Image (spheres, rainbow, N blue to C red):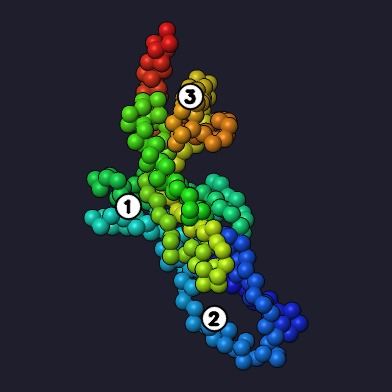
Amino acid sequence: MPLLTIPVDDVAYVWWYDNEGTIQSHGINFVQDLPYFLVLLLCFERFTPRDWGIISSFKSAGRPGHDANRCLLSFPSPPSLSAVQVDVNHTNKIRGRFGIVGRATEIFPAHSQSKDPRDADKSLGGMELVVKVYWAEASRAGEAEIIEEARRIAKRDDDVKGHIPDLICSHDFKEHPTERIREALGISSKGRVLRVMLFRRLYPITELIGEEFWKAFWEASFVSALQHPVVTCSHSCGARSLSALGPGCTAQRHQREESHVRQAQRESRYS
């Protein structure tokens, strides 16, 4: 959330940029109103890194002068476990939408050697991971809550089981909301918050071939046609929007075996 001072002749304007939009101050004449301008500079001098929008949970993962493209992200965890440390390469974007305003969703490949926060006996080492970063609307239900509800549905509906994204952990940086400065200035705000989510990586089903592709497409299309509002797709169920675990993955082979059983059950149901 950077601040920028733009001088026009002898008048300076202060601009604030974030994902909810921009805020512009009245002009300050730094010749005629020099004392006020100096007070403004003294205020800026006393800003903490948090006031400048710097999030301490994001740290450089490389040596000084080396590996500048890597970032170390720390996810808060339950008291019984240490924080989940994730190494993110923010140059190899899997998905990126550049924009000053809006969600600005970006997805990056990542890896971690930390314990799985869902099961302390397991490690995240060797697992392909992705980090999803975006500015979510604070008033809307969180994606983690929706996925958790879908998991509860999957426990009682075999057709949904195996089609829920594998969310490992999620965190909202509520100490950096876009509404903070707007409330201080008396400006109405919808409010956005930075949300970071750690998933097991999925690949487009277009990387599957022949029978495997059609089985994956049929399974996903069938789930999208169900009447569960949580698991129903909000857009057309095209091949580009569908994903699966990487080829050769043991979990994927197990999922395919389960899909054969569920398909046989459905065929017997309609026969």
Q: Quadrant of residue 245?
A: top left
Reading the image, the residue beneath label 2 is 44
Q: Secondary structure at mark 2?
A: helix
Q: Can you tell which quarter of the image residue 77 is in?
A: bottom left
Spatial CA span between label 3 and label 2:
56 Å
**Residue lying at 49% horizontally and 73% vertically, measured from the top left:** 51
In the shown orientation, is residue 264 left or right of residue 102? left
Badge 3 or badge 2: first in the primary sequence:
2
Q: Answer with left or right where residue 33 lies relative to residue 244.
A: right
- For badge 3, the amino acid type reads Phe
Q: Quadrant of residue 38?
A: bottom right
- Indicate which disc, 2 or 1, sits on the residue closer to the N terminus: 2
**What is the distance, in whole Å, between disc 1 and disc 3 at their CAs?**
36 Å
Q: Position of residue 95 (x, y in %)?
A: 56, 47
Q: Secondary structure at mark 3?
A: helix
Q: Which residue is mark 1?
A: 114
Amino acid type of the residue tagged 1 in the rendering: Ser
Disc number placed over residue 222 in the picture, else none: 3
Question: Which residue is painted at 76% across and 82% down in the image?
Answer: 9
Q: CA distance from mark 2 to mark 1?
A: 38 Å
* x 37%, y 15%: residue: 265
Q: Dot 3, how many residues are within 10 Å of its Cα: few (below 14), some (14-19), or many (20+)?
A: some
| Residue nearer the viewer, 90 or 261 | 261
